[in-house]
Image (cartoon, rainbow, N blue to C red):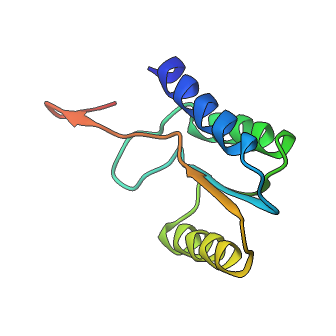
Amino acid sequence: MFKKIAVVLLLILVIAVSLSAQARFALVIGNNNYTGLSTLKNPVNDAVDIAATLENLGFKVELVKNGNLGAMERAVINLKNKLSASKDSIGFSTTPDMVCSQGGKTF
């Protein structure tokens, strides 16, 4: 599953980099911990890797690790403000964590 997501992200990045924008901004959120759910193993590590890749591609990255709702909302507003203030800018946002529950089990 992660490989499919990585391929899609790579495709999006290639398209984004090929565009001639003055500024590139990215928001990457990785949360391992959710209230009432078991701890996830990889989202923060995946987010760090994605953020590093985006930085190497020229994006100014804001990385939120294990952020609460307020921190995530502030980060989204910051991204919106940066994109609004910069003509011809590109924005990218992702969170590599996904939580699914079925039959009392959390994945």
Residue 59, given in percent of the width and then of the height, sits at: 79, 52
Figure quadrant of residue 61: bottom right
Position of 39 with respect to 94 (left or right) is: left
Residue 4, given in percent of the width and then of the height, sits at: 48, 21
In the image as oriented, which residue stretches furthest toward the front?
Answer: 20
Question: Observer-nearest residue: 87 or 93?
Answer: 87
Q: 22 above or below 47?
A: below
Residue 28, given in percent of the width and then of the height, sits at: 63, 51
Position of 68 with respect to 84 (left or right) is: left
Figure quadrant of residue 51: top right
Position of 26 with respect to 74 (left or right) is: right
Residue 15, given in percent of the width and then of the height, sits at: 64, 38
Residue at x-position 73% and y-position 74%: 87
Quadrant in which the N terminus is drawn: top left
Quadrant in which the C terminus is drawn: top left
Residue at x-position 78% and y-position 52%: 20
Residue at x-position 48% and y-position 40%: 97
In the image as oriented, which residue stretches furthest toward the left?
Answer: 103
Question: Observer-nearest residue: 92 or 32?
Answer: 92
Q: How many marks?
A: 0
Q: 88 above or below 78?
A: above
Question: Observer-nearest residue: 52 or 107?
Answer: 52
Residue 45 seen in the figure: no
Residue 37 seen in the figure: yes
